[in-house]
Image (cartoon, coloured by chain):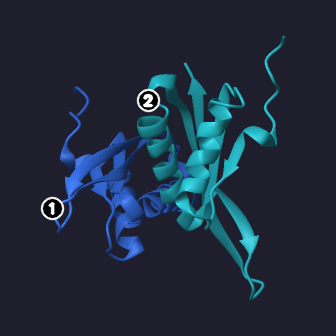
Chain colours: A cyan, B blue
Amino acid sequence: MAEKPKTEENTIFIGGKPFMNYVTGVVMQFTTKGAKEVIIKARGKFIARAVDVAEVSTKRFLKEHHIVVKDIKINSEEFENKEGKKVNVSTIDITLIKK
Amino acid sequence: MAEKPKTEENTIFIGGKPFMNYVTGVVMQFTTKGAKEVIIKARGKFIARAVDVAEVSTKRFLKEHHIVVKDIKINSEEFENKEGKKVNVSTIDITLIKK
């Protein structure tokens, strides 16, 4: 069977939920769901958390699964804040793959 | 003349000082100091800030200098906290180069 197309399903958006929710999300993608690739995405202050999720998932929970960081991209997005002023927020995409 | 060796001088460690201090540091490395490569390093909660510094430096202040992200590495460091307990902290190294 052909490789699954990359869908939103393989993407974990990091926000303010309990930390382990995100780690479990990443781990389950690779284990029970058989994903070959998972993208961890975050914006602004959640970027540090995205790195924590990637590190804890790969080094503590997926040690025997040979999951590695394939690529990390950073970027900026412009959005309007509550006062209608345009502000920039940084973003990060951390792509993990099964070797 | 041979290319300068990579020294600590080309490394900017991100901490709690005013944001623009770091941006100015990166910009000056590439402009007045003629660096070919600058590494922005941060740990823990300062990781999001490191990404902001990289984005603002390259996209707002160094637009005409063709500075791009060459590589981003994430890792974990173990250290002892005040209670003597070993804890992990995530780290990021963002390498910028002059194209």
Q: Amino acid at mark 2?
A: Lys
Above-or-below relation of B86 to B76: below
Which picture quadrant has residue B4? top left
> Where in the figure is residue A73, as x and y percent of width and height?
58, 42
Residue wearing tag 2? A63
Q: Residue at x 59, y 38 (%)?
A: A27
**Number of residues whose C-alpha sits closer than 10 Å to that of mark 2, classed few (under 14), some (14–19) or many (20 or more):** few
Q: Amino acid at mark 1?
A: Gly
Query: Which sits in the foreground, B43 or A37?
Result: A37
Give whichever of B51, A45 is nearer the camera. Answer: A45
Residue visible at 36% across and 49% down in the picture: B91
Measure the alpha-carbon separation of dots 2 and 1.
26 Å
Q: Residue at x 20, y 47 (%)?
A: B8
For label 1, the residue is B84
**Who is closer to the viewer here, B36 or B48?**
B48
Quadrant of the drawing holding the N terminus of chain A:
top right
**Label 2 element class:** helix
Can residue B71 be seen from the camera position used here? no
